[in-house]
Image: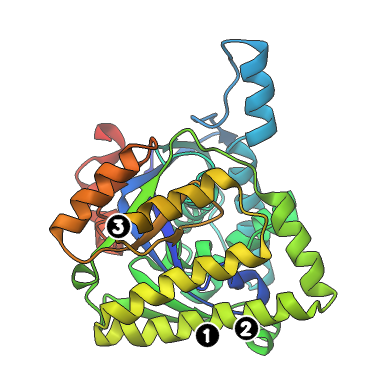
């Protein structure tokens, strides 16, 4: 019986987001604190096993209603199915012959739900990695995020962009340019690894903080902005251009180690977002509390988690204490690389995680 395993890590959108869905530019990184583990076991039939986000029992009617409002009816299994469908279609379209074999798919996830750390795309990207291993299919790396995007956006109707899928397939810290002509002609953007590469994230003093009780569905705000963008609203078009410029200047600051410039760009990124989105006060408070401790701060995704930089150990201690006062957990992210995936899985990551 053949078994393959794959892993995807949580990600933080560091600069430029949400311009990934608007032909902009972004910088993101993966980190090892949270992940999805996925296993495919050869079996007689294709089978998808429910995971932690496929809840079927609840403590009360109120919990049921809240869960379904936030997470929907289908959990993670729908993502496993959608990615499988797009993978098989991609292979057929590109003349990639696959062996005739079936699998049972199982996954584990410890990424906090709906706080902007990209748990759903981690399920999708881990599934695609596992499928490629199971069937021995070597797909161009630049195409793999697009397959995940199509699974979520086209198959499931989820409003999303390429950024999360890119960073979870590439790992590390990546600068992404989603120039319209390139994306529309090839289905992917230009992806540059800043780390591993010329940059050293350990010198940037990065942090991530999140509110484990802050789960919130953010699709309505994104759909409104997307509609205005498609209508060529001048304010939205200008904002997306500014986001892209922030990411581009951030790339330069990261590569040169200019932490002062980087902190200003992090703050500018959130301030711009706050002008065009209806940011919930609870989410805005996380950013402002972090800034009151002297750190830079912006959303790591759609809200519920923030990321930024701090100056020194004393400031980090203040940051951690101040954010704990409003119920947030703070960590110093270890940047996740492809080697982290293979090393942990080789040591029995599925069984011991």
Q: Is residue 80 above or below residue 183?
A: above
Q: Is residue 43 above or below residue 130?
A: above
Q: Which residue is mark 2?
A: 241
Q: Are marks 3 and 2 in contact (CB under 8 Å)?
A: no
Q: Are marks 1 and 2 in contact (CB under 8 Å)?
A: yes
The residue depicted at 34 percent of the width and 53 percent of the height is 208
Q: Is residue 216 above or below residue 242?
A: above
Query: Mark on residue 124?
Result: none
The residue depicted at 49 percent of the width and 80 percent of the height is 246
Q: CA distance from mark 3 to mark 2?
A: 26 Å
Residue 75 location, x and y as percent? Answer: 61, 35
Say which label, 3 or 2, has the lower sequence index.
3
Q: Which residue is mark 1?
A: 245
Residue 174 location, x and y as percent? Answer: 40, 74
Q: Is residue 23 visible?
A: no
Q: Please identify the quadrant where the C terminus is shown.
A: top left
**Crowding near pointer 3: few (<14 within 10 Å), some, many (20+)?**
many
Q: CA distance from mark 1 to mark 3?
A: 23 Å
292 relative to 219 in the view: left or right: left
Q: Nearer the viewer, residue 24 or 135?
A: 24
Which residue is situated farthest in the front direction here? 292
Q: Nearer the viewer, residue 170 or 288?
A: 288
Q: CA distance from mark 1 to mark 2?
A: 6 Å
Q: Quadrant of residue 292?
A: bottom left
Local SS, label 2: helix
Q: Please identify the quadrant where the N terminus is shown.
A: top left
**Crowding near pointer 1: few (<14 within 10 Å), some, many (20+)?**
some
Which residue is situated farthest in the right direction here? 231
Q: Which residue is mark 3?
A: 207
The residue depicted at 19 percent of the width and 44 percent of the height is 347
């Amino acid at each position: 019986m053949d078994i393959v395993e794959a892993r995807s890590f949580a990600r933080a959108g560091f600069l430029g987001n949400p311009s990934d869905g608007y032909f902009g530019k972004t910088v993101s990184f993966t980190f090892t604190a949270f992940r999805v583990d996925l296993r495919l076991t050869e079996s007689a039939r294709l089978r998808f096993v429910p995971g932690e986000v496929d809840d079927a029992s609840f403590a009360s009617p109120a919990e049921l209603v809240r869960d379904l409002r936030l997470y929907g009816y289908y959990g993670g299994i729908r993502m496993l199915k959608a990615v499988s469908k797009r993978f098989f279609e991609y292979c057929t379209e590109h003349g990639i012959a696959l062996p005739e074999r079936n699998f049972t798919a199982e996954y584990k996830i410890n990424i906090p739900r709906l706080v902007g750390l990209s748990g759903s795309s981690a399920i999708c990207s881990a599934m695609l990695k596992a499928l490629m291993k199971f069937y021995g299919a070597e797909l161009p790396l630049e195409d793999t995020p697009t397959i995940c995007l199509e699974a979520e956006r086209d198959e499931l109707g989820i409003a999303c962009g390429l950024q999360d899928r890119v960073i979870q397939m590439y790992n590390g810290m990546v600068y992404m340019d989603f120039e319209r002509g390139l994306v529309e002609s090839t289905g992917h953007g230009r992806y540059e690894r800043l780390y591993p590469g010329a940059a050293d994230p350990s010198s940037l003093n990065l942090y991530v903080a999140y509110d484990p009780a802050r789960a919130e569905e953010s699709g309505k705000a994104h759909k409104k902005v997307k509609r205005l963008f498609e209508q060529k609203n001048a304010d939205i078009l200008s904002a997306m251009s500014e986001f892209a410029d922030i990411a581009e200047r951030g790339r330069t600051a990261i590569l040169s180690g200019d932490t002062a410039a980087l902190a200003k760009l992090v703050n500018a990124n959130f301030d711009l977002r706050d002008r065009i989105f209806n940011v919930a006060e609870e989410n805005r408070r996380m950013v402002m509390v972090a800034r009151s401790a002297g750190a830079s701060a912006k959303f790591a995704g759609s809200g519920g988690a923030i990321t930024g930089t701090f100056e020194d150990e004393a400031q980090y201690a203040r940051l951690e204490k101040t954010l704990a006062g409003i119920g947030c957990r703070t960590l110093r992210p270890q940047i996740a690389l492809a080697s982290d995936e293979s090393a942990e899985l080789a040591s029995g990551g599925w069984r011991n995680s």
